[in-house]
Image: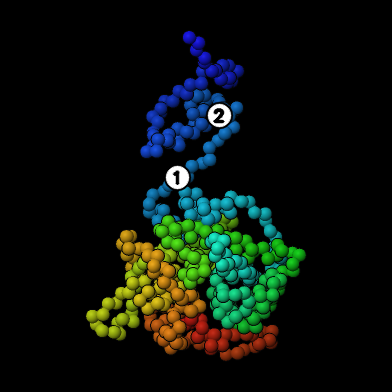
Amino acid sequence: MLLLIKLVSRAGGWYLPITIDEYDVRTIDDDGGVDDDDKDGAKQGCQLDDDTKVDEDDESRPIVSPTLPNAAVRAQHELSHGVFAPWCDSCVVGRGQDDHHKTATVTDTVDKRRRISFDYFFARQSQGEPQVAILAMIDNRTQYSNCTVVEKKGAYPDVVRFCLRFLEELGLNENDKILLHSDDESSTKQLTKQLVEQVHVQASRTTTVSDSKGSNGLVERHIKTVEGQLRCHLHSLASHNLSLSSSSQAFTWFVRHVAWLLNRFHVSQKDKQTAWQRLTGETYSSPLLLFAENVFCYNKTALRGPKLASRWSSGMWLGRHSLSNGHVCFVPSEGCVRVFRTVRRVPLTDRWNQTSLDSIAVNPFRPAIAKDATKSQLHRDFSSGSHSVQESPKVPKEQPSSSGVPVKRYTPEMFWVFNTLVIQK
Ligand SMILES: [Zn+2]
């Protein structure tokens, strides 16, 4: 009988390739695999010889296996996916490549004025779907940003109001000087032109000339981040057996919610802060739910109705309102989206409903179906105490600025927009 023994060369001598493992308790999982520690060649090498940490001839090394945290940590992470988690399927599927891809440092323009950049991008989930246009904007000082699905590119009243509202959220005052920045495309230039005419701060605008693409880099990088977050949250929705077509009305709410989360929970690797922290100096701490989760909404307007009528309505959670911080919920029985101060979660088994999600026929610009969307009715609904926005804001009088040039201000009509329609965002 011929016995072949393979010897290995190591540290100047020949040895039998035997691993002497003093902790040789190999755990086998349900699928029959050996657990990660046992598969780790480097660890076995350590036990073989203190001087020789790894086999010099073997350059293979395993990809680090992520450790799954406990259920509470996983549930908390799922609310925002704000910080990339290697153990989270949605993060890996949606953002994995971006996080490991080293981006070249793009030098933004030398102009140090506060700059708000605007750009459009298109999105869809499959080849068969129509492309949806999304407008993105970002402030270079705080990285505070926003996004909305738009009907079309260009400056039409809804989108102008949305952008003015974004500028208001930045807390700019009349002495601030801002630069509204866009690329060379006529639709974006048209938008910034309208904004310069209507905003109440001293604004001017600039465009990126076609041969210096880098100077619009901030908003372009922001769009990449938004796309990653959208993929991530769509995957997360799919894990609850919910699907969301890009061309649906529900998708318009979804994009707004993802943009809202991005500001409050996406931590920059540079300064370990969120845009919200840079803007307000505070950490956002209000509790969250998951997008499209079924909830009970406390209906304060029911207090005016019959005493025995239910004060809770079934709703679907679509996010939080950026001004009032109220819960934005779709109410299937009314076919509209409203803001509530109080919501309650339902048991896990009743939490998801594709039919309700598909039945959303209103968007953030038109939160109620046409027949209900009268000005007075909306105003009443949204000033019933379910939010904290002032009902009759003071409209400042026209005053010349220190430079003698009249400062553009919000008109009363615009205030109405900010305090009623806006609440329905
Ligand atoms: Zn995640």
Residue 327 in view: no
For the residue pair 369 and 212, the one nearer the viewer reads as 369
Please, which residue is most extreme toward the front here? 128
Number of numbered callouts drawn: 2
Q: Residue at x 57, y 64 (%)?
A: 123
Task: Determine whether the residue tagged by mark 2 lies in a helix, strand or loop.
Answer: loop
Residue 214 in view: yes
Q: Is mark 2 within 8 Å of ligand 1?
A: no
For the residue pair 196 and 297, the one nearer the viewer reads as 297
How crowded pointer 1 is (Cα within 10 Å; few <14, some 14-19, many 20+) is rated as few
Amino acid carrying label 1: it is Thr
Q: Is mark 1 within 8 Å of ligand 1?
A: no
Amino acid carrying label 2: it is Val
Q: Which residue is mark 1?
A: 67
Relative side of 236 to 57, left or right: left
Q: Residue at x 51, y 81 (%)?
A: 418
Q: Position of residue 372 (x, y in %)?
A: 42, 84
Task: Determine whether the residue tagged by mark 1 lies in a helix, strand or loop.
Answer: loop
Q: Residue at x 52, y 14 (%)?
A: 4
Relative side of 327 to 269, left or right: left
Q: Which residue is mark 2?
A: 54
Q: Position of residue 174 (x, y in %)?
A: 61, 81
Q: Which of pointers 1 and 2 lies earlier in the amino acid sequence?
A: 2
Looking at the picture, does residue 356 appear above or below residue 53?
Answer: below
Find residue 210 and report its image quarter: bottom right
Find residue 34 and report its image quarter: top left
Please, which residue is most extreme toward the left here? 308
Please, which residue is most extreme toward the right here? 211
Looking at the picture, does residue 45 appear above or below residue 72?
Answer: above
The CA span between labels 1 and 2 is 23 Å
Q: Residue at x 38, y 29 (%)?
A: 25
